[in-house]
Image (cartoon, rainbow, N blue to C red):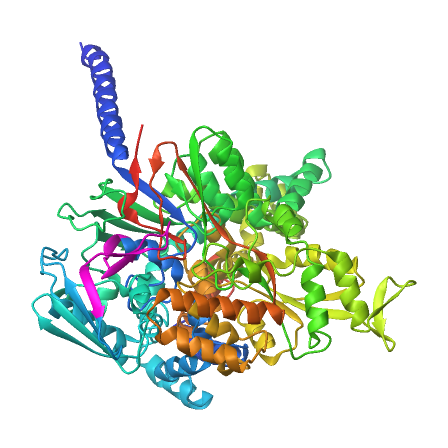
């Protein structure tokens, strides 16, 4: 008699387990349809746009926050987002914005001119210790609500860059009531008006956001008007190979910033979709040439160096040909790019040889290197460990025209110290930015020795152009100024352009809508992410 | 015994103080600073860099900064991270459990495999098993753990599908990292177990035990092994300390939470408040673990006293 219940119990138990597991499976599948896990390389540094200085924080900011103005990353055009229209006073010092009146923050606080003014005051408040927003907003002095939904921003000098600056990742509008209620904690519990609401942050691991069901104020250019996924999880997986493996095994639905080789594997696999986005660069990846240190203090040597560089070979060898060529000091699709300046120095080893002969560096047939007065033509090449393989390719290319190369590998910030001292002839560098005026950081006279002017280049006209372009609001005039700038910088051969960085993304089949934002091409608007059949 | 613990604790405080001071000055010897990193993404000028530096208190003389650091540290305030803007200590303590989990798991892997191969090799010395065991331990010892980690991911996650690739959510997630990290330790321990066991097995009291007719398993377990444990426990203790700070590569390969990952990122970013806090906590743990190791000597060998 005692065995019968036992016999009965097992099948019952089994059936129950099967039922439960089926149920669980169904639930998890149902959940999987409306959730997405994105594997990103680096952990967000801080969840507060006004404090962040890390461009890779931006995908989150463009999910949780809206800006007054947003940029269509595909065309570079600016569109109204929380502002409906804007104008600037005749003296260029006061900007007036009309704001939407139907917007509410995630905590229920209405968005109005007072709230917007609070945000701008917060960016420049020393207590905020802003690292990026404060610089992006330029010569700002005061923000005023002059109507319930009319905002005035005042500047000490004309700032033509403002609309573009307002579209960047540091300019998200935060809920003023949340900032007051949470104090410092707000930086880790962000409250905005964006398509996704903050849910949780697990340091060292992940950030979770959920759909904002009230979202109805998407900018016109956006592909979607409302968020698709119920939840989106950002998972931080630093190692490229691990991130790729996690996507392959289905632990994440999308992997950002993939290695070129992994990305090609996914491209060949029908279970995955791949996207590649060009990143704006001012300048794109290349080598700054130090114009003060011999032998590159001679413009003939600098020009020869660019002619001797086959950047296509670098792109083929190091990036499997996925990356595009860059044009001079700007990426080819940047605002103001001038192809005439960008294509000034085609790959031409013969021409390089002629220039070097002209400069007095003659070939010593026994060594294969060029010499002048018994001194060998040698280039000090400073680079970072992550991109040192490019130096090997270039060393071989330059050797063919008789240039000897010493490669010095350093990591930041040691590299910056060496470059500031001008101990190099060429230094690898790559930068983003939303406007060509970012080049001032790389070519402004004031940034020699202490900043990022690694070419150690100072030119009076270039200084004037930066000042004029900063104040000018007419985009056509600005484009002309930047064209002139490119002709000067390339005429003086201050950079060896190498390639334009591409952001490589792969996702499980069906996940789509990763559109570039912020003009740098780095970051997608979470709003547009969706799943199709 | 209590006097001993008090003495060692005081010594530990001195050690931790020394370590933190050393770290403070070494960090300031490095070229560049956090501001360099912060502004590296966009076109800030030299003037703007200097403004930010002043705001963050980085322009004060180094001794003033050091004094401020000490004054705050004794009150338990290790400052605020320059990047995350969060207080340093909570940031470290929220990452610590996963590092301890990995260190414990890797130690278990190391001890289990090390003891098995080391003891059996010693007992069957000069047999084929002895040679094989020592060859395996040599291999385990020489394989770099990041490489093992990637191989494990490839074999056990992607091909066999047994374990997750990344994360530290469940105990299931700790298996591959623990093996990747623990196997080289197992190799080390196997060799150590073998040599200390051989030494003890050759001693008079073992011969006496055998002569008394004590069964061989009992000779190995009760007489030999217990006496062989003291050097092994010492090595386990020191190695546990290394695992606390040295698991960083494995934490990165498997995208785990952890203090190693946190500190290494802080070092690269010159976030020196975070580095200091992390190193002080790690150093304190290291000292604590070794204190515990010292105290176990008395349990293992009653002849040792702590007067």
Instruction: List x then y, in percent, for residue A369.
Output: 84, 65
Residue located at (29% from left, 55% from top): A62
Q: Is residue B235 left or right of residue B39?
A: right
Q: Is residue A271 above or below residue B46?
A: above
Instruction: List x then y, in percent, for residue B205.
Output: 62, 51
Q: Is residue A162 above or below residue B56?
A: above
Residue located at (55% from left, 73% from top): A416
Instruction: List x then y, in percent, for residue A493.
Output: 63, 69
Nearer to the camera, B117 or B107: B107
Q: Quadrant of residue A93?
A: bottom left
Residue located at (14% from left, 55% from top): A106
Q: Is residue A488 left or right of residue A180?
A: right
Q: Which residues are magenta?
A: A63-87
Nearer to the camera, A173 or B138: A173
Q: Residue placed farthest to the right in the image?
A: A366
Q: Quadrant of residue A423?
A: bottom right
């Amino acid at each position: 008699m005692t065995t019968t219940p036992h016999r009965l119990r097992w099948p019952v138990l089994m059936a129950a387990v099967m039922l439960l597991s089926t149920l669980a499976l169904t639930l998890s599948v149902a959940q999987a349809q409306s959730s997405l896990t994105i594997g990103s390389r680096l952990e967000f540094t801080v969840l507060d746009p006004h404090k962040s200085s890390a461009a890779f924080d931006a995908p989150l900011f463009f999910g949780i926050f809206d800006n007054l103005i947003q940029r269509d990353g595909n065309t570079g055009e600016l569109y109204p987002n929380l502002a409906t229209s804007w104008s600037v006073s005749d003296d260029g010092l006061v900007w007036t914005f009309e704001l939407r009146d139907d917007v509410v923050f995630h905590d229920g606080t209405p968005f109005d001119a007072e709230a917007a003014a609070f945000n701008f005051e917060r960016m420049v408040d020393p207590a905020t210790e802003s690292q990026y927003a404060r610089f992006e907003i330029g010569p700002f002095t005061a923000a005023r609500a002059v109507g319930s939904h009319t905002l005035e921003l005042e500047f000490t000098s004309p700032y033509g860059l403002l609309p573009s600056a307002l579209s960047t990742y540091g300019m998200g509008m935060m809920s003023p009531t949340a900032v007051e209620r949470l104090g410092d904690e707000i930086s880790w519990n962000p409250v905005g008006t964006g398509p996704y609401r903050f849910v949780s942050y697990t340091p060292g691991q992940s950030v979770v956001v959920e759909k904002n069901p009230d979202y109805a104020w998407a900018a016109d250019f956006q592909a979607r008007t409302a968020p698709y996924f119920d939840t989106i999880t950002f998972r931080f997986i630093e190692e490229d190979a691990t991130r790729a493996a996690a996507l392959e095994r289905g632990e994440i639905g999308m992997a950002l910033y993939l290695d070129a080789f992994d990305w090609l594997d996914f491209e060949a696999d029908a279970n995955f979709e791949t996207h590649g986005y060009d990143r704006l660069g001012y300048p794109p990846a290349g080598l700054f040439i130090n114009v003060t240190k011999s032998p590159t203090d001679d413009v003939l040597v600098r020009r020869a160096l660019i002619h001797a560089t086959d950047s296509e070979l670098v792109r083929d060898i190091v990036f499997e040909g996925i990356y595009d060529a860059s044009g001079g000091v700007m990426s080819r699709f940047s605002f103001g790019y001038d192809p005439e300046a960008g294509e000034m120095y085609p790959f031409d080893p013969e021409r390089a040889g002629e220039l070097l002969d002209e400069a007095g560096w003659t070939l010593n047939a026994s060594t294969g290197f060029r010499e002048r007065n018994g001194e060998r033509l040698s280039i000090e090449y400073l680079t970072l460990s992550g991109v040192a393989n490019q130096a090997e390719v270039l060393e071989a290319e330059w050797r063919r025209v008789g240039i000897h190369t010493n490669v010095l590998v350093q990591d930041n910030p040691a590299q910056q110290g060496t470059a500031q001292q001008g101990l190099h002839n060429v230094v690898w560098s790559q930068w983003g930015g939303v406007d060509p005026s970012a080049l001032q950081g790389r070519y402004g006279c004031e940034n020699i020795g202490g900043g990022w002017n690694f070419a150690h280049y100072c030119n009076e006209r270039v200084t004037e152009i930066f000042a004029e372009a900063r104040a000018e609001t007419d985009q056509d005039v600005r484009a002309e100024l930047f064209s002139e700038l490119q002709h000067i910088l390339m005429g003086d051969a201050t950079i060896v352009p190498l390639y334009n960085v591409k952001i490589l993304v792969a996702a499980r089949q069906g996940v789509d809508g990763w559109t570039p934002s912020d003009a740098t091409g780095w970051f997608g608007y979470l709003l547009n992410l969706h799943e199709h059949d | 015994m209590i006097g001993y613990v008090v003495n060692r604790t005081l010594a530990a405080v001195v050690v931790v103080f020394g370590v933190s001071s050393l770290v403070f000055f070494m960090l300031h010897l490095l070229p560049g600073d956090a501001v360099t990193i912060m502004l590296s993404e966009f076109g800030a000028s030299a003037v703007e860099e200097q403004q930010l530096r002043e705001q963050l208190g980085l322009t004060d003389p180094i001794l003033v900064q050091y004094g401020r650091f000490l004054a705050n540290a004794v009150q338990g305030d290790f400052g605020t991270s320059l990047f995350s803007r969060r207080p340093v200590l909570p940031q470290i303590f929220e990452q610590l459990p996963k590092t301890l989990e990995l260190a414990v798991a890797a130690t278990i892997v190391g001890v289990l495999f090390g003891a098995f191969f080391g003891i059996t090799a010693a007992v069957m010395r000069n047999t084929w098993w002895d040679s094989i065991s020592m060859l395996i331990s040599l291999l385990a010892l020489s394989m770099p753990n990041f490489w093992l980690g990637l191989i494990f991911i490839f074999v056990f996650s992607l091909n066999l599908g047994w374990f997750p690739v990344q994360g530290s959510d469940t105990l299931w997630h700790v298996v591959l990292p623990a093996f990747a990290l623990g196997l080289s330790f197992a190799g080390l321990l196997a060799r150590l177990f073998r040599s200390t066991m051989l030494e003890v097995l050759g001693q008079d009291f073992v011969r006496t035990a055998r002569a008394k007719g004590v069964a061989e398993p009992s000779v190995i377990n009760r007489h030999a092994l217990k006496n062989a444990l003291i050097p092994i426990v010492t090595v386990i203790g020191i190695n546990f300390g290394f695992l606390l700070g040295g698991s960083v590569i494995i934490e990165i390969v498997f995208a785990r939470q952890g203090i190693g990952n946190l500190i290494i990122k802080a070092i690269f970013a010159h976030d020196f408040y975070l580095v200091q806090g992390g190193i002080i906590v790690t150093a304190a743990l290291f000292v604590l673990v070794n204190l515990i190791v010292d105290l176990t000597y008395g349990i293992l060998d009653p002849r040792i006293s702590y007067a």
